[in-house]
Amino acid sequence: MSVNLIPTVLYSAMVGVVLSALLRIFTITKPKQTMYLSGLLVLLFIHIMGELYIFTGVFQYAPAIAGFQLPVRMLMGPALYFYAYKAMFPNSKISLKAHLLALFGPAVVFLSMIPFIFSITPEQKLALANPSTRDPALWKIAIFVCLFTAVTFIVVTFAYLIAALRLHSQHRKQLMDKYSAIEQRAMDWLKIILLLWGLVWLFYAANYAASFFGFNWFAMRSLLPVFEFTVLVSFLNLALKQLELSEPEETKRPEPQPREAVISHDKMQLIADKLTTAMSEKALFKDEDLSLNGLSTAISVSENHISETLSQFMNTNFFQFVNGYRIEEAKNLLTNSDMLVSSIAFEVGFKSKSTFNSAFKKRVGATPTDYKKNN
């Protein structure tokens, strides 16, 4: 029996990583996204076992179950989307229709596999693995199933990845309407992970399809598992840390609707004056945990009216409004004091120097250090 050592070792390690993550999930407090993360891990486990089925040569002893993992893989994209949905919008319900739609990919793939499942015996399936013993007619069926499942996998998976990226954009915007510090809430790591999973699955599908035409590149066979292992470990590390956040966000996915002013222009002017006073005279922006709720309490104006004034009257959002004052104060301190840049970042209300540097450069066009040197 021929064993591909490098992929076997790496996918075996992935089995351990996934099982360890599942065990950890079952021993910690279970927020709403845990069920979907657990489901995604089970699907990844089946996918990994499918790879081990091939690379260890076990298929030679159990050819009857060849292709068992193909319909299941179609659920990985939807599962990642559902996890992202619940992690970012824990109070929004995922509809039954959305769950049923997720079954479309597996159903289509299963239907395409019917000839392969019922028209080919285990012995004939095993014979297909060797060019000298394969039946040309049956090989055509196998190639059709392979290409069809690979294309379907990419189409379905990327549709859900794009939908998840849009969710992240909506979530980030919603947070910027409520908080002045969003780095611990925005799950920006998820955007990067989604893109990396997309690359992993694109390369996987391409390599899977190419192997049926005799293109078995050693680099792809060895480097792809390394890449997949790295993304898997990174994702689980970040996802499990996200589960431990002590401050769950009471967010719901916003419903699309036209924005219309519900308060008068004069009232928005009065609220804008209060907001300006709270920032310029009371320096509320120095509170690193300042939120829309906190500002609402401080100036005795409802959150909805503040949000309306910021968006409709001042053409900004809460995050940009507060951090604008922080950066202006930072510019003053950089010019007129000997304080260290790191000290200034915390003095004006930022939670970290990196967040301060990024926000400052985006607004001013230069880093705080360069601004200090030139002024």
Image (cartoon, helix red, strand yellow):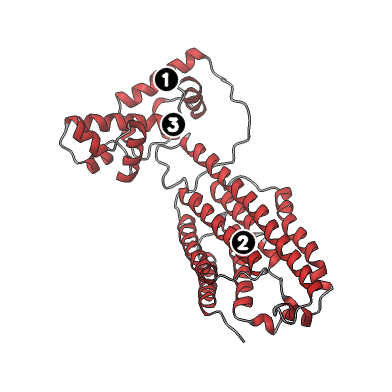
Badge 2 crowding class, 10 Å Cα cut-off, few under 14, some 14 to 19, many 20 or more, is: some
How far from the left and from the top, in percent, is residue 208?
63, 66
Please give the label number shown on residue 318.
Answer: 3
When the figure is inspected, residue 156 is found, relative to residue 256, above or below; the finding is: below
Residue 83 placement: quadrant:
bottom right
Residue where numbered disc 2 is placed:
206
Please give the label number shown on residue 272.
Answer: 1
Secondary structure of residue under mark 1? helix
Amino acid on which disc 2 is placed: Ala
How far from the left and from the top, in percent, is residue 1?
62, 87
Residue 261 placement: quadrant:
top right
In the displayed structure image, the side of residue 310 where residue 166 appears, left or right: right
How far from the left and from the top, in percent, is residue 161?
59, 50
How far from the left and from the top, in percent, is residue 366?
30, 35
Q: Residue at x 63, y 35 (%)?
A: 255
The residue at the far top in this view is 266
Secondary structure of residue under mark 3? helix
